[in-house]
Image (tube, grey):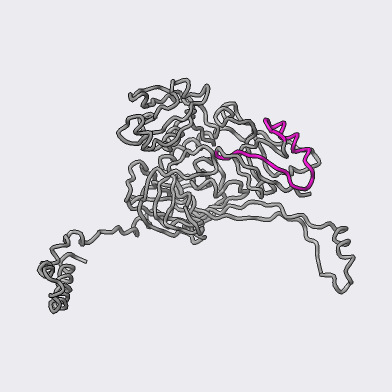
């Protein structure tokens, strides 16, 4: 609505209001004079001008052909059935007329499916989606916007960033371009295209609500600073793109914050600059390596800012420097406040691991910090993050027994033992079985099994082999710096 029609409407309503109030001027007193002022003048006309809201139709039309639907299937072992002898024993106590017509079926594996979204980033068939959409899948199918279906090959998976890179055997495919996520501003319009609840190629718009959001994940090392938006993201949108108005991908939809499982208008997307870094490494080696500084840190609050005579709270307060870590070698000390890392300002303490994770081990980086009221600059050579460890060591069990726990473990590196400050083994892969049912996650550190201390894979294997064939056993784990005990039910 233009400003003039609105002003006319306000004036018209004001006249009717005055006609109603004039007989009651005794009640209004001097206020009546104020009420006779031209009311439209109180409301600036530019505030009611046409808002010029964007039309997303052209953006959707130009990019929809590069959006894909991901279908991931995982094979799950069927539940064991009664043997013919046990079944006959069970039925023997029943009269013939009470016996149900039970037929034993072959123990065939069951298929569990997951549906997500993704998008093409090259004409030769590279596809990006979320790691959690395809992790552990036996078969991945990608459906294009034109309804063609391709089997996808996994090029690489990266759990800390929740990014998966897939490859289709195809050429001359439509694709989208990445934009600069650093240039995104709070309040910018954004658009998501994906398959919420399996409703393929659905579009939803909103604005950027915040940047640099840290959301707890499965990894104890939080290398992500999400873009938060109010776009309606639901189950099935995972892995789809978040566009700016220029049609560039500035985020990959990854998580929602919800009390109901549906969209509450709080969604989180992986910044495109992070995705480009991860994709480049996955293409080159199939894995992602991240740097490590080696400090424990916390937020600089108002009290700390006052104590250290800062003009305002900012930066990452160094609570502790790990022995023999890159930070220790560079001369970083306890109670230093890191305000810049390799040219990136550290506003909140969660910014530091995010930026450190963008560089590979061996990178020399400049760190600016505040110590004793003075700004200092040190150079640090980054170490290797514990998330870089490969999952190669597997629990060995007796040949006649199937792995009763349903998960595999790997050794902790010396660096990880130093950073985490504990001994144990890392959960490298969780399959369907007792471990998953008990709540184990990849990345958990197992410190004891069946009340026996675990310090190596060989110790873990020996304890696992001696476990009873059925019953409950305790397992002690560390997750995100917190210890907890889980109960695993073993089944014959």
> Residue 210's x, y, as percent?
37, 47
Question: Any magenta on residue 474?
Answer: yes
Residue at 81% x, 66% y is 102
Residue 291 makes an appearance in the image: no
Which quadrant of the figure contains the N terminus?
Answer: bottom left
> Residue 78's x, y, as percent?
72, 55
Residue at 45% x, 50% y is 253
For residue 484, what is the image quadrant?
A: top right
Q: In the rendered image of this protein, does residue 480 appear above or below residue 237? A: above
> Nearest the camera: 360 or 263?
263
Question: Any magenta on residue 137?
Answer: no
Residue at 81% x, 57% y is 82
Q: Which segment is the magenta one?
A: 452-480
- Left-right relation of 231 to 139: left
Q: In the rendered image of this protein, does residue 259 appear above or below residue 351? A: below
For residue 91, what is the image quadrant?
A: bottom right
- Left-right relation of 80 to 288: right
Residue 328 makes an appearance in the image: yes
- Count every numbered label the image shows and give the total: 0
- Left-right relation of 254 to 446: left
């Amino acid at each position: 609505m233009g400003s003039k029609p609105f002003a006319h409407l306000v004036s018209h309503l004001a006249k009717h209001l005055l006609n109603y109030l004039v007989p009651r001027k005794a009640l209004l007193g001097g206020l009546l004079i104020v009420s006779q002022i031209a009311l439209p003048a109180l409301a600036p006309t530019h505030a009611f001008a046409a808002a010029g809201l964007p039309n997303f139709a052209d953006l959707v039309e130009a990019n929809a052909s590069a959006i894909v639907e991901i279908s991931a299937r995982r094979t799950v072992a069927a539940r064991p059935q009664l043997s013919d002898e046990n079944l006959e024993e069970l039925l023997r106590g029943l009269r013939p007329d009470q016996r149900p017509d039970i037929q034993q079926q072959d123990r065939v594996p069951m298929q569990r499916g997951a549906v997500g979204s993704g998008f093409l980033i090259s004409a030769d068939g590279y596809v990006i989606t979320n790691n959690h959409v395809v992790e552990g899948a036996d078969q991945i199918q990608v459906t294009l916007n034109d309804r063609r279906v391709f089997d996808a090959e996994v090029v690489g998976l990266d759990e800390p960033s929740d990014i998966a890179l897939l490859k289709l055997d195809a050429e001359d495919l439509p694709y989208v371009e990445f934009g600069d996520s650093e240039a995104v501003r709070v309040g910018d319009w954004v658009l998501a295209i994906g398959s919420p609840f399996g409703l393929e190629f659905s579009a939803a718009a909103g604005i950027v609500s915040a940047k640099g959001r840290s959301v707890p994940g499965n990894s104890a090392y939080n290398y992500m600073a999400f873009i938060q938006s109010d776009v309606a993201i639901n189950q099935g949108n995972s892995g789809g793109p978040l566009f700016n108005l220029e049609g560039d991908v500035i985020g990959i939809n990854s998580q929602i914050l919800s009390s109901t499982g549906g969209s509450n208008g709080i969604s989180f997307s992986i910044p495109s600059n992070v995705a480009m870094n991860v994709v480049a490494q996955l293409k080159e080696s199939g894995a992602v390596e991240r740097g490590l500084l080696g400090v424990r840190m916390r937020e600089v609050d108002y009290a700390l800012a006052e104590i250290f005579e800062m003009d305002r709270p900012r930066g990452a307060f160094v609570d502790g420097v790990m022995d023999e870590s890159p930070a220790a070698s560079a001369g970083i000390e306890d109670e230093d406040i890191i305000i810049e890392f390799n040219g990136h300002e550290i506003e909140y303490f969660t910014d530091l691991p995010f930026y450190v994770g963008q560089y590979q081990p061996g990178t020399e980086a400049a760190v600016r910090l505040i110590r004793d009221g003075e700004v200092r600059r040190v150079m640090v050579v980054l170490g290797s993050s514990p998330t870089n460890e490969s999952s190669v060591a597997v629990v060995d069990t007796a040949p006649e027994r199937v792995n009763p726990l349903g998960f595999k473990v790997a050794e902790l590196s010396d660096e990880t033992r130093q950073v985490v400050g504990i001994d144990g083994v890392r959960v490298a892969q969780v399959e369907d079985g007792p471990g998953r049912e008990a709540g184990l996650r990849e990345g958990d550190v197992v410190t004891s099994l069946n009340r026996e201390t675990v310090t190596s894979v060989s110790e873990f294997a020996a304890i696992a082999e001696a476990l009873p064939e059925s019953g409950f056993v305790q397992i002690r784990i560390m997750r995100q710096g917190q210890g907890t005990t889980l109960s695993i039910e073993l089944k014959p």
